[in-house]
Amino acid sequence: MMNDPLSLKLSPGAIDMAKLLALLAMIIDHANTIFLSPSRPELFAFGRMAFPLFALIWALNLHRQPSRLQARANRLWLWSFITQPVFWLAFREIHYGYALNILFVFAGVTQLFAWAYRYQQRGVAAGTVLLCLLVWPLNFASYGPQGIILTLSLAVLFSPELQRWRALGLTGAVVALLMLNGMYRVAQQPLDTLTYYILPTLVLPFAGLYLAARLRPEGSPRFLPRQFFYYAYAGHLLIYGVLLTILEKA
């Protein structure tokens, strides 16, 4: 059982509520990107909550049953490939065809931990090579190295077996959050970068966790069906892709 204080404060219902908040932020962010031209900066800022919050939830759940890590990885790989065609459909005007959806980040990092659990150092080496191969196609639409570093760091931070590395995990997570959404823009657009990129990325995920914990306090049961996120993620991209096609033909 994990002894991290944050994990103990979140009921199953709170975790499901956090998933809903992250999903809402993602749906709004994608609609803003795909359908609005120019996109609205306040909607973009709200969307910065989605990936870090999903990554936090994923990291909290990752180590609960180490023997099932490979099963978790297999499910993520399956949904990554199922979702990729509708991801292409929805973002065909924005991203290159070889850009990968965000599920590949979680699949790759989960696979590293699954191999590490089974093969120890050889598994870590193989998983590292896999993540290096994923960096380039993830860089175009799914945060690239920053996203991988964030998920890796959070996984280390919440691992009961890697407590001696927690300081490194926390440092990596903070640095990744700072770099996730355009730290390089600070010199050119300092106020906009701070307002719409950096602060929302740092503040909104934790605000979402706090709100979820208040809405679903200790003892609240789960209320979302299993694998709900996968269906919602692929489903909203399919709907957006179809709507985009209809609008283009109108």
Image (tube, rainbow, N blue to C red):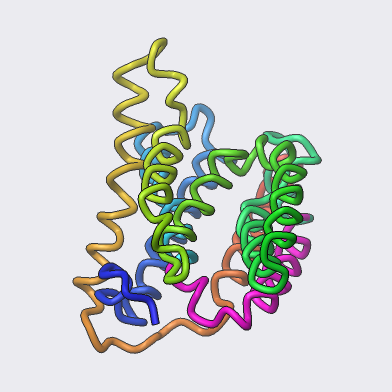
Residue 120 percent location from the top left of the image: 67, 66
Specify the segment rendered in magenta.
60-84
For the image, the number of numbered tags is: 0
Q: Quadrant of the N terminus?
A: bottom left
Q: Residue at x 54, y 39 (%)?
A: 146
**Placement of 152 over or under 160, stated as above or below:** above
Seen in the image, is 197 located left or right of residue 243? left
Residue 64 lies in the magenta stretch: yes
**Placement of 35 over or under 51, stated as above or below:** above
Q: Quadrant of residue 34?
A: top right
Residue 47 percent location from the top left of the image: 42, 46
Q: Quadrant of the C terminus?
A: top right
Seen in the image, is 62 located left or right of residue 98? left
Q: Quadrant of residue 86?
A: bottom right
Residue 137 percent location from the top left of the image: 74, 40
Q: Residue at x 72, y 53 (%)?
A: 125
Q: Main secondary structure of the magenta part?
A: helix
